[in-house]
Image (cartoon, helix red, strand yellow):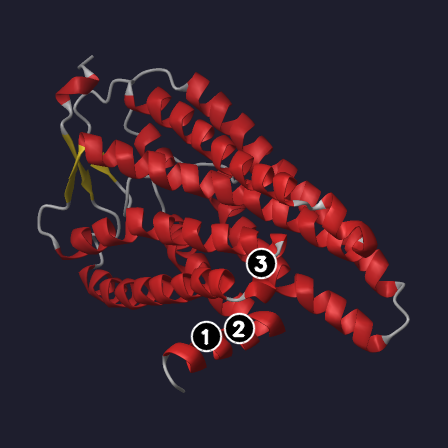
Amino acid sequence: MGNYSAVTEFFLVGLSKYPELQLFLFILCLIMYVIILLGNSLLIIISILDSRLHTPMYFFLGNLSFLDICYTSSSIPPMLIIFRSETKSISFIGCALQMVVSLGLGSTECVLLAVMAYDRYVAICNPLRYPIIMNRVLYMHMAAWSWIIGCLNSLVQTVLTMVLPFCGNNVIDHLYCEILALLKLICSDISMNVLIMTVASIVLLVIPLLLIFISYVFILCSILRINSANGRKKAFSTCSAHLTVVILFYGSALFMYMKPKSKDTKTSDEIIGLSYGVVTPMLNPIIYSLRNKEVKEAVKKVLSRYLKI
C-alpha cells in the first residue's frame, strides 16, 4: 500500500484513443464556451438593467446564469488545454479544486431548479398571494440555501475522496477531475464514499426532481382550469423554459450518477459528461430567450439602447 501523498499530479486520458475527435471537441467546446459566457452574461445584465425583470423568477434565473458561467469556467478551459497538451496532466491540488467547484455548482443547480419550480407553482396556483409568499426575504434565503447546500455536499465528498490513498495510480480515464473517475483509482475501502454519494444523489437529485414533478402536477391542474385559451398559453409559456432546462439537466445528471457503474469508463459516459457540463449551460440562456416573451423584449431593449440597433 502506497501513500496518497505520493501522487502529486494526475493524467487525464479521456478520449485519448480518438485524437481526431479531440480536435473536433476542442473547436466545438471553445465555440460553446464563448456562447455560454455571452448568453449567460447577457441574461444577468438584462435582469439587472430592466426593472420589469426585478422579480423572484429572474433573480433565480440570474443565479442560474452566474452558476453556469462559474461551472463551465472551472472545467472547460482546463479541458481545452488537456485536448491540445501532450502531457495531459493536472496537479493534485488543481484536480481537487476543479472537483470541489464543479461538484458544488452542480449540486447547487439541482436545488436551485427545485426552488424555481416552487416559484412557478406559487405564481400560477396562488397568483394573488404571490407577492406576499415570494417576498424578498424568502427568495433571497432560498437562493442562499441552494448555494450553501451545494457547497457543503461538495466539500464533504471532495475531502473524503482526496484523503484516501491512490497508491501511485494517477491516470484518470476522463476529460476532467470527476469524482466517479477518481474513486476508481483509490486502493482502499470506498464503501463510505459510495454510501455518502448515494445519499447525496437521493437528496440532491431524486428529491428535488420529485418536488419539481409534484409542483408541475399542480401547475398543470391550475392551467387546465383556466377558461381563456390565451390565459392557458401565457401560463404555460412561463413554465416551459424552466421545464425544458429541468429535463436536459436532470436527464444527463441521472444518467451519470444513478445508473449502475462499471469498472471502466465508457466513451458514452464521457460524452454524457460533456452534455451535462457544456451543452446544458449553453442551452439555458437560449431556451429562456426563445421561450420567454419578457426576456426577448428586455434583450431587444438593452441591445437597442447600448448598441444603437
Task: Look at label 2 and name its amino acid.
Answer: Ala
Task: Look at label 3 and name its amino acid.
Answer: His
Identify whether 151 is placed above or below 120.
Answer: above
CA distance for labels 2 and 1: 6 Å
Neighbours of disc 1 within 10 Å: few (<14), some (14-19), many (20+): some
Residue 302 marker: 1
Residue 139 marker: none
Residue 298 marker: 2
Element at label 2: helix
Task: Look at label 1 and name its amino acid.
Answer: Val
Task: Kindly indicate the quadrant of the structure image that contains residue 224.
Answer: bottom right
Residue ID at (45%, 17%): 192
Q: Which residue is mark 3?
A: 54
Element at label 3: loop
Task: Kindly indicate the quadrant of the structure image that contains residue 100.
Answer: top left
Residue found at the very far left of the displayed protein: 86
Residue ID at (48%, 39%): 107
Question: Where does the N terminus fall, quadrant-wise?
Answer: top left
Horizontal relation, residue 193 to residue 176: left or right: right
Which mark sits nearer the N-terminus, 3 or 2?
Answer: 3
Identify whether 303 is placed above or below 163.
Answer: below
CA distance for labels 1 and 3: 15 Å
CA distance for labels 3 and 2: 12 Å
In the image shown, does 297 or 97 lie closer to the viewer? 297
User: Residue 247's x, y, as percent?
Assistant: 59, 56
Residue ID at (27%, 32%): 96
